[in-house]
Image (tube, rainbow, N blue to C red):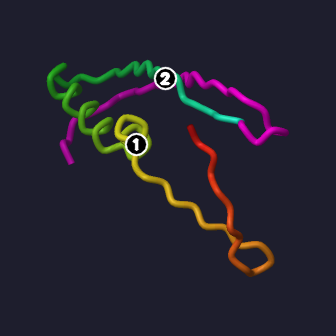
Amino acid sequence: MMNVPITKARVRVVGKFRQDGSVLAQTIQGSCLGIETQLDVESPAPAADVAGVIRNAENGCFTIQAIRKPSPVQTTVSLNGRPLAWESRTS
């Protein structure tokens, strides 16, 4: 750990999302238009040290990294204990 004292931290996160298509027509598509974060920090430590903590926290955050660098998603489905053949209709 970096041993940088953080007296107080407050974060505000806003996600912007969109849906297109139809559930009934099975053409629904959800997308993320962006995520905004506002982090307010109080600390007696030098600004460069606090910036390093923030950098490490963001770079080590699995959720942020999954959004920035999408990974393959594999889905398998079972119905009543048996594999269900289905097909994703993504654009």
State left or right for residue 10 relative to residue 77: left
Seen at 68% across and 61% down, the residue is: 86
Secondary structure of the residue carrying numbered label 1? loop
Q: Residues within 10 Å of mark 1 (few under 14, many from 20)?
A: few
State left or right for residue 50 relative to residue 13: left
Label 2 sits on what residue type? Gly
Residue 53 spot, x, y in % from top left:
24, 34
Front residue of 86 and 45: 86
Q: Which residue is mark 1?
A: 70
Earlier residue among tags 1 and 2: 2
Q: Within the image, what quadrant is residue 85 found in?
A: bottom right
Mark closer to the observer (1, 2):
1
State left or right for residue 70 relative to residue 4: right
Q: Which residues are magenta?
A: 1-27
Q: Which of the numbered marks, if any, corresponds to residue 81?
A: none
Q: Which residue is mark 2?
A: 34
Measure how far apart labels 1 and 2 are at the Cα level. 13 Å
Seen at 18% across and 42% down, the residue is: 2
Residue 19 spot, x, y in % from top left:
68, 27
Front residue of 36 and 16: 16
Residue 38 spot, x, y in % from top left:
44, 18
The relative height of residue 67 versus residue 86 in the rendered view (above or below) is above
